[in-house]
Image (tube, rainbow, N blue to C red):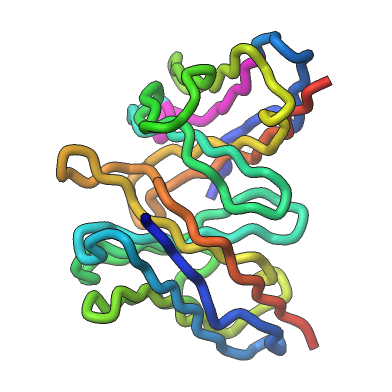
Amino acid sequence: EVQLVESGAGLIQPGGSLRLSCTASGFIFSDYALHWVRQAPGKGLEYVSSISTGGTTTYYADSVRARFTISRDNSKNTLYLQMGSLRAEDTAVFYCARGGRVGGAKQYFFDYWGQGALVTVSS
Amino acid sequence: QSALTQPASVSGSPGQSITVSCTGTSSDVGRYDYVSWYQQHPGKAPKFLIYDVNNRPSGVSTRFSGSKSGNTASLTISGLQAEDEADYYCISYKGGLSPYAFGTGTKVTVL
């Protein structure tokens, strides 16, 4: 069974830093691209960041580029999101999601999602 | 980034069919056949429903179907059931440095 479990959430002051982790199981971790998606309270889903299977290629939403860093440790089956210069508008539930594969080829969808981790930025 | 436009709400009676639209541009929905759809119940993680415009992953009910015309993709739910009451989101690949565009979300209500 595919499982994605986020951790590291909490309350952080504006301007602070926080690292989220997403531990995966039930699939060959290094075969899949991975993503972070967030959802502010009462709002819709918002794209945050993506990372390739080997970790060499990364992508970011304009709203987080230069403040957030995505990374992965394939030996630990873990995805990370290092968040810095946090703002009140970063308050959200952060989901990690697995990228799709069909017939062994990378696909452009998100097939499994974690349960989410709430990050609250407030003084 | 510009979000894909979805109606804020759509409603229907049990057994009816409803359609949720997702309007983008020629740079995202209109350019790529990589539109996917997700269902989210309150307090829960999104659930994957449709990929590549009109493909259902195994385990997803055949009552859910997708289509696309020009810059607009659509999700149709046929034989509407009470359990279908949820928020629905579309996502389109668009390439570039920020490669995914997300829909604004639609609340589906079963009357």
Residue extending furthest toward the right: B111
Who's the residue at 27% across and 42% down the image? A107
In the image, is residue B49 above or below residue A107?
Answer: above
Residue B62: x %, y % from top left: 47, 18
Whether residue B27 appears in magenta in the rendering, the answer is: yes
Q: Is residue A17 left or right of residue A119?
A: left
Viewer-proximal residue among A37 and B60: B60
Q: Which residues are magenta?
A: B18-29
Whether residue B73 appears in magenta in the rendering, the answer is: no
Quadrant of the snapshot with the C terminus of chain A: bottom right
In the image, is residue A4 above or below residue B105?
Answer: below
Who's the residue at 69% across and 21% down the image? B81
Q: Quadrant of residue B69?
A: top left
Q: Is residue B97 left or right of residue A11?
A: left
Residue A10: x %, y % from top left: 66, 83
Quadrant of the snapshot with the N terminus of chain A: bottom left
Who's the residue at 44% across and 64% down the image? A4
User: From where the camera sits, is residue A114 visible?
Assistant: yes
Viewer-proximal residue among A62 and A8: A8
Q: Quadrant of residue A120?
A: bottom right
Residue extending furthest toward the top: B16
Residue B10: x %, y % from top left: 74, 23
Q: Is residue A96 left or right of residue A87?
A: left
